Image: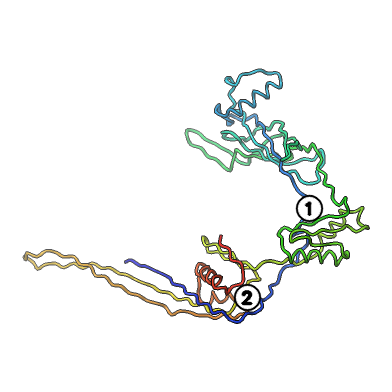
Amino acid sequence: MKKLLAMAVAVSLLMGASAAPVAAESATTRIKDISKVQGVRSNQLMGYGLVVGLNGTGDSNKSTETIQSVVNMLKSYGVSITADSLKPKNVAAVMVTATLPPFVREGDSLDVTVSSLGDAKSIQGGTLLQTPLRAGNGNVYAVAQGAVSTGGFMAGNGGQGVQKNFPTVGLTPNGAIVERTVEDDLGTNGSLSISLSKADFTTAARVASAVNSRYGNIAKATNPGRIDIRIPSSYRGNVVGFVASIEELPVMPDSVAKVVLNERTGTIIMGGNVSVDECAITQGGLTIRVEAASETSQPSPYSYGTTVVTKDTDVEAKEDNAKTIVLQATANISDIVGALNAVGATPRDTISIIQAMKAAGAIHADVEII
């Protein structure tokens, strides 16, 4: 038996009188959770180094950078050796990365990530040699050294091997020592700026209004992503306390009406500000079933006839009654979900319906397909 199944989904949209969208409730949050103070930022550090003490799992002779690095290192200690005579199976060339937090001082410790650069099989149990870590401007801000912990392993015998996690990437906790202080002049000119995590005109205006309600007319939304604030004279000697008080102020961030559709998984995410005009949604199903049966015709005994096989095909078509539901012009997100569930729409059917609603201009939201 062979079955062919096809689903037809029709969406009919009737534009009605325009109505004001229903306001959705937004969560009140702290200014600290949706913004940051300009100048308070981290910096990325990177360096090239060597991991030694490996149990034959280091780089091979094909890794010329490792051989050259070992030769140069030994030469600085007064040991002369040629590159041809060196077998670096216990050494691995690595890249060392770290993040330099704001306001760190000399002597502070940082965690560093050590990643194999050559063809080493594992850096488990190795020791990172002293490695300068540079920022994008070329200056050295920290120096890293210490034991490498990979959190994985490799084991093999007789051509069979087992590997867990990634033994070519490891971590050295508190392996870097800060050598240069990073100081940002916060509020030294009597003002500071707050940057929103997501630029929005309404949210910027609300943040400025919240600050002005607390301290007077000292804040101004310069653009959708930045609010400039004058530090009150009473806080000139306590900028940290002033920033802390601003971060705790409650504000209601605004969000754009948006619908995100994932056609690969059938996932649909809708924001609370989504609204629609009056429209009618119709869904119906069409099922086609094809059956093929074989029949055999046998000749009479002792006759000269031959056996004949014939095929009998039966085609049946069935169309279900369509289900129609009408949404009023005051519909919001809950009405959309309830209506689509009422007509029995699957997630993939719902995606097609929302796309058709957007094409007809009946849904007021940004529709994004990922």
What percent of the width, then of the height, locates residue 312?
24, 70
In the image shown, does 102 or 213 lie closer to the viewer?
A: 213
The Cα atoms of the two marked residues, 2 and 1, are separated by 38 Å
Q: Are marks 2 and 1 in contact (CB under 8 Å)?
A: no
In the image shown, does 292 or 222 lie closer to the viewer?
A: 222
Q: Residue at x 55, y 40 (%)?
A: 163
Number of residues whose C-alpha sits closer than 10 Å to that of mark 2, classed few (under 14), some (14–19) or many (20 or more): many
Reply above or below: 35 against 287: above
Residue type of the residue flagged with mark 2: Asn
- Determine the image quadrant of residue 292: bottom left
Reply above or below: 317 against 241: below
Q: Residue at x 61, y 82 (%)?
A: 17
Residue type of the residue flagged with mark 1: Gln
- The residue beneath circle 1 is 38
Q: Residue at x 74, y 44 (%)?
A: 43
- How many numbered circles are shown? 2
What percent of the width, then of the height, locates residue 180?
80, 38
- Determine the image quadrant of residue 131: top right
- The residue beneath circle 2 is 332
What percent of the width, then of the height, locates residue 204?
76, 63
Disc 2 is placed on an element classified as loop
In screen coordinates, is 286 left or right of 125? left
Disc 1 is placed on an element classified as loop
What percent of the width, then of the height, locates residue 120?
58, 33
Number of residues whose C-alpha sits closer than 10 Å to that of mark 1, classed few (under 14), some (14–19) or many (20 or more): some
- Protein image colouring: rainbow
Q: Residue at x 68, y 33 (%)?
A: 128
Q: Nearer the viewer, mark 2 or mark 1?
A: 1
In screen coordinates, is 90 left or right of 183? left
- Determine the image quadrant of residue 295: bottom left
